[in-house]
Image: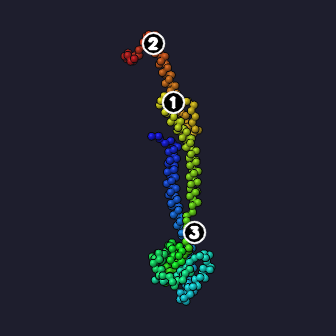
Amino acid sequence: MKRKSFRGEIFFYFIVVFVLFTAAILTFQYQREKRYRTAQLENTLDNITEITYRFIEQNNLIQKNELNRIGEIQRIIPQSNIRITVIALHGEVLFDSSADFKQMENHLKRPEIEKAIENQKGANIRHSETTQEDYYYYAKKYPGYFIRTAVVYNVQVKNFLEAEKAYIFFIIAVFAIIGIILYLVTGKLSDAITKLKDFSIKAGKNELVEPDTAFPDNELGVIGGQIIRIYHKLKKAKDDLSNEREKLFNHLNALNEGIAFFSPEKEKTL
């Protein structure tokens, strides 16, 4: 089985880290961005419900049966397509700015109203059976009634609620730059390691190793150069010793005589 190169392993782990880190960042940032944009929309709708509530109370519109004056609010708020509905606590629709409220059924079981009953406010995206359009609903409970505001859930709203994707390209660009830098740095390291590997293989097979092998100008290159120089010194010393030994044996053979070695105790050792 072919082993991965040093550079290959570095890039493999880099890609693994990149994928895991990017997935974590994108998931976190996407959800955070989506929550932020949803909160922005709900904050706008909440402001309109507050304005509507104060307008109703200050002008006693329910007591005077003049809820139709809520249309005056729609003429002054910046958002012209906002739908405003006033609903009694038992679910009866008291006013709706986009439909004939007298023909509308009880709204007590609407998801946004149920949430408002439990949490004072609630939101929901659903299809309106009255206007046959999709809405982003926001309802808030007040003493005596609910005020519900809604915006048509069209392409503009969907795009607004979608998380910004620019940061995705930013993260990819950052990792691309890191990848290029890593590629350049590991190139020199990989070159030095490859030459050391080739040297070890040749040395193990007693093959010729060039003494002037060029290494990158870094710490690993210095170590590699030193190893090869030390190897050549040891090899030269070994070769010189072998040559002297060969000369000695040739000389003895030529004399047809022998030689013996004795220890200080006059015992024969060779």
Q: Residues within 10 Å of mark 2 (few under 14, many from 20)?
A: few
Amino acid on which disc 3 is placed: Val
Residue 250: percent from left, percent from top: 47, 14
Location of mark 3 (residue):
155
* 36 and 126: which is toward the camera: 126
Q: In the image as oriented, which residue stretches furthest toward the bottom?
A: 64
Q: Is residue 144 above or below residue 202?
A: below
The tag earlier along the polypeptide, 2 or 1, is 1
Q: Which mark is residue 240?
A: none
Name the residue located 37 percent from the left edge and 16 percent from the top edge: 267
Q: Mark 2 is on which residue type?
A: Asn
User: Which residue is more in the foreground, 153 or 240?
Assistant: 153
The N terminus lies in quadrant: top left
Quadrant position of residue 151? bottom right
Residue for point 58% across, 57% down: 169
Instruction: Look at the image and tell me whether residue 89 can be seen.
Output: no
Residue drawn at the location 47% of the way across and 31% of the way down: 204
Residue that label 1 marks:
231
